[in-house]
Image (spheres, grey):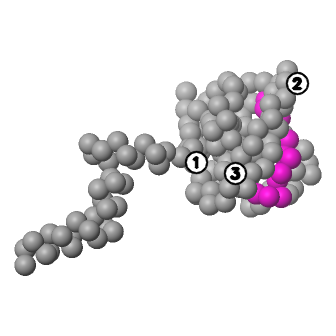
């Protein structure tokens, strides 16, 4: 009886998940590493194009998954944008401040939250069409989005 119980336990799918998906001495979980996402998981593999225009006019083209934030795009594509996203999307700095075109700003889903507004008040070069990149979630409608990255950043945490 004990032997049958042991066999059932070891052959059940649940014990398989515990054995191969938990952290421990097994290194099999390295196969499951996925790109960073500071927002809800991007369940679709559809990608949209985003252009970052730096203060010196240099243009950086990248792709991000639907559901990712602009911060995720910068991190996952290892873009060299100095200081961008220093707080890792926790809304405690304004280093991912971006400026959008009026049309792009108006097609963003959702409103600016009070927390984002507070951080934007600390950003250099603030405009009527400024947002924090960590709060802009990519959607299919935003394919081809172009954002301007200001020359100077202000890390509100310092």
Q: Which residue is mark 1?
A: 37
Looking at the rendering, the stretch of residues picked out in magenta corresponds to 139-150
Circle 2: element type: loop
Q: Read off the residue under disc 2.
A: 57
State the residue in front, 100 or 113. Answer: 100
Res 149 seen here: yes
In the rendered structure, the answer to whether residue 108 lies left or right of residue 83 reads: right
Q: Residue furthest top?
A: 56
Task: From the viewer's perspective, tell me whether residue 116 is left or right of residue 6.
Answer: right
- Residue 89 lies in what quarter of the image? top right
Mark 1 or 2 closer to N-term? 1
Q: Is residue 135 left or right of residue 53?
A: left
For the residues labelled 1 and 2, the Cα–Cα distance comes to 28 Å
- The quarter of the picture where residue 1 lies is bottom left
Q: CA distance from mark 1 to mark 3?
A: 10 Å
Within 10 angstroms of label 2, few (less than 14), some, or many (20 or more) residues? few
Which label sits in the foreground, 1 or 2? 1
Tell me if label 1 and label 3 are in contact, CB under 8 Å.
Answer: yes
Residue drawn where x is 31% and y is 62% of the image: 16
Residue, disc 3: 65
> Is 93 rendered above or below residue 153?
below
Q: Residues within 10 Å of mark 3 (few under 14, many from 20)?
A: many
């Amino acid at each position: 009886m004990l032997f049958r119980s042991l066999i059932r336990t070891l052959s059940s799918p649940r014990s398989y998940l515990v054995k191969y998906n938990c952290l421990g001495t097994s290194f099999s979980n390295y196969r499951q590493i996925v790109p960073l996402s500071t927002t809800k998981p991007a369940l679709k593999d559809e990608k949209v194009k985003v252009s970052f225009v730096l203060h010196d006019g240099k243009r950086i083209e990248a792709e991000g998954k639907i559901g990712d934030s602009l911060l995720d795009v910068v991190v996952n594509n290892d873009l060299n944008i100095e200081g961008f996203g220093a707080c890792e999307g926790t809304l405690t700095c304004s280093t991912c401040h971006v400026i959008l075109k009026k049309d792009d700003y108006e097609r963003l889903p959702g409103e600016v939250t009070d927390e984002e507004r507070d951080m934007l008040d600390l950003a250099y070069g603030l405009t009527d069409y400024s947002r924090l990149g960590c709060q802009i979630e990519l959607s299919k409608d935003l394919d081809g989005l172009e954002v301007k990255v200001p020359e100077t950043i202000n890390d509100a945490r310092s």
